[in-house]
Image (cartoon, rainbow, N blue to C red):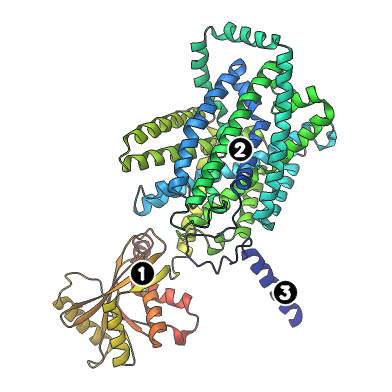
Amino acid sequence: MARQMSSARRSRKKFVRWLLEEDRRGKTAEKAGAYSKETTHRKHPWWQVMCLTGVDYFSTLGYQPGIAALAAGALSPFATLILVLLTLFGALPIYRRVADISPHGEGSIAMLEHLLSWWQGKLLVLCLLGFVATDFIITITLSAADATAHVVENPLVPKALHGHEIGITLALVTLLGAVFLKGFREAIGIAVFLVGTYLLLNLIAIGVSAHQIISHPSVITDWQTTLFANHGNPLVMLGVSAILFPKLALGLSGFETGVAVMPLVQGKSSDTEERPQGRIYNTHKLLTTAAVIMSFFLITSSLVTTLLIPAQEFQAGGRANGRALAYLAHLYLGEGFGTIYDLSTISILWFAGASAMAGLLNIVPRYLPRYGMAPNWARATRPLVLVYTAIAFVVTILFRASVEAQGGAYATGVLVLMTSAAFAVTLAAHRHHSRRGTWTFGVITLVFVYTTITNIIERPEGIRIAAFFIGTIIVTSLVSRVWRSTELRFDHIEIDETAHRFITEEEASQGTIRLIANRRNEGDEQEYFMKEKEVREDNHIPETDSVLFLEIQVSDASEFVDNIRVQGVQVGKYRILQAQGAAVPNTIAAILFYLRDQTGKIPHAYFGWVEGNPIQYLLRFMLFGEGDIAVVTREVLRRAEKNPERRPAIHVGG
């Protein structure tokens, strides 16, 4: 029995090590530093990373022409042209600028993080992360559901699969999660193959369709007749197209992911962590190339599908509904090519969630663990993959693998993130006193605001789903923050020369280092005289034993971790260690451990009793980093040091 239990423990430890091991990064999540902001990823050429983001962006060709035809009818090419102009002259310049300012994958969220200080800034980030989750999680579930729809609608697939859409979608989501459990390199390799094959097949299908149009020019005449019969003149057509194009907003997806996965982009050997110029330049190429390729396919696919497919085929139940290019591939290139095209579409739609998964794996660990709003294991890839896969399961079941039911949430997430990015870039231009940039990006921001509001009005279910994600993230984040509040919570301690001298003098003069915790008021000799007198009397400290005062100033209580800076100050004969930190008890505990490790002696800290409602002090600790300092300090010490004999001593009197 004992041998079996030992074997089970070894198996559990081996599984945990595998789970926390990062994807060939050379260091595990635990070794990366408990509170470090950066994670190190294996780098790849920009065009390979473009394929990873492109599985989402380019896969929209599977359904975008059909959505455009349903939304705009004969005006579909004009509405698509407006979308392309917004892509090339709106989204692309915005996200190239985001890549310049935020080259470590934080995206526009990092640019907006510092707009508001204290807890308001953290709440803003949590709300934006809610929209990120909406965009990326729904990308995973919607793409898998759409791949399932292409599977069951293929004429060669047995009818027995109809009615099993949820099961097929869950299987596809599971397979996607399994790829990421294996590693990023495998995911990128699959993405390169799928994107290359899919774009080539689309080029063939669109080329053959264009040849049909040239061979039968009457379809152009019929289209023109329909346009003028329904809309009268070109100005009206453009006006109606401008009103309708927000319904095509799914064609804008992919930009936020493009900057989120910047840490995967290979730069130059001369790059520095502060300014990775090569990575920024290559990300510009990634974004521009993807936008140009997609713009070409959006325009051409919209033209050929609008001119060659009867309007009724786009409707629900029609053979081109949700698969317009697949319809043309079967029609003009035969069932053999059509089936190959279907398989390619199904594959890229299934793997479209890969770009979203990669984005989540890069963005979330940069914020929530650093805020104390997620466990430290959330910095590792594999546990997060399991969490996101489980969430995707729940979403798929709740929406019954329906593409239509999830479309509004997807578009809302995409547009809100683009609007926030445009606003962030506009604000950055204003701060740098660029009048031209402020006006240019401001106009783009207004266009995105209009598009977002229109989409929310048309499909209000999207904002409701986003609100659910935001609420869930806020609640779970606050619970995690409370749970982790008694960690040490610091990156490193900096001691100035005077403080170091005080500590050295104490170490040399006596066997015990004694610190009196003091909340400074006047900061004069009288204050320190009265405080020392009170502490010595309450704790029977001999007059022959010298003491140091310890004063902590809270820098920003909403931050979970901080660099602790200690400076020595002398007021008359009294020596004071003054420090800044995110929370008073945690900072005191960190300094006590530092003193123990530097001197080899157990330090003693002296506190006074506090009076009042314990709940009030708990809230003060959570919100302002103070509260019942003695009690919380002891709990932080107890959690960090399991051996009582090596634990700094806490004394409370009064």
> Please, is residue 334 above or below residue 291 in the view?
above
Q: Quadrant of the C terminus?
A: bottom left
Lateral position of residue 334 relative to residue 25, left or right? right
Lateral position of residue 527 relative to residue 496, left or right? left
Cα separation, mark 3 vs mark 2, equals 45 Å
Q: Secondary structure at mark 1?
A: strand
The residue lying toward the viewer, choosing from 201 and 18, is 201
Lateral position of residue 243 relative to residue 167, left or right? left
Q: Quadrant of the N terminus?
A: bottom right
Name the residue that disc number 3 marks: 8
Residue drawn at 39 percent across, 75 percent down: 589
Crowding at dot 1, Cα within 10 Å, few <14 / some 14-19 / many 20+, comes out as many
The residue lying toward the viewer, choosing from 140 and 163, is 140
Name the residue that disc number 1 marks: 564
> Please, is residue 571 above or below residue 511 in the view?
above
First in sequence, mark 2 or 1: give its number. 2
Residue 603 position within the rendered picture, expressed as x and y whole percent measured from the top left? 36, 84
Residue drawn at 50 percent across, 42 percent down: 467
Name the residue that disc number 2 marks: 57
